[in-house]
Image (cartoon, rainbow, N blue to C red):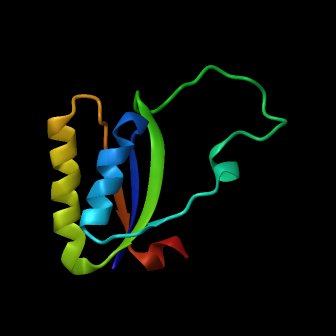
Amino acid sequence: MKIFLVIYNADCSDEVLQTFERMQVEPYPLHEKGRTRTRGARGQQDKQIWTGTKAMVVLAVAEEKENALYQALEEINRGHKNAHVRTFAFEPEELL
């Protein structure tokens, strides 16, 4: 099993989340508070690492589904010019 961090353009949220549902992979819920700046943070221009990436999910994926997940997310990137799906995989032990 690996832990996946998937970052993508929010405009493609439906397709990305449907892909997870079709593969029977449940994303971990991310609390809204964890995604926003704190009240005391100073205002800055929005400087994204990848233009258009505005959504993120964390998944625990069984080994037998890993390749299928990569292929499904690559298909979204090929089908949508601005999907900007980026996937990072970690061994659970690496995150402890």
Q: Give how far across and how far down residue 94 sits, in percent.
A: 46, 73
> Would you identify the image quadrant in which residue 90 lies?
bottom left
**Image height of 81 relative to 22, above or below:** above
Of 45 and 14, the residue lying toward us: 14
Establish if 19 lies above or below 95.
Answer: above
Look at 15% across and 57% down and name the residue there: 71
Residue 87: percent from left, percent from top = 33, 53
Q: In the image, is 69 to the left or to the right of 88? A: left
94 up-or-down from 16: above or below: below
Residue 22 falls in image quadrant: bottom left
Q: Residue furthest right?
A: 40
Residue at left offset 34%, top offset 39%:
12
Q: Residue at x 44, y 77 (%)?
A: 92
Question: Which quadrant is home to the N terminus?
Answer: bottom left
Q: Residue at x 54, y 63 (%)?
A: 29
Rendering coords of residue 91 (x, y %):
39, 74
Q: Quadrant of the C terminus?
A: bottom right
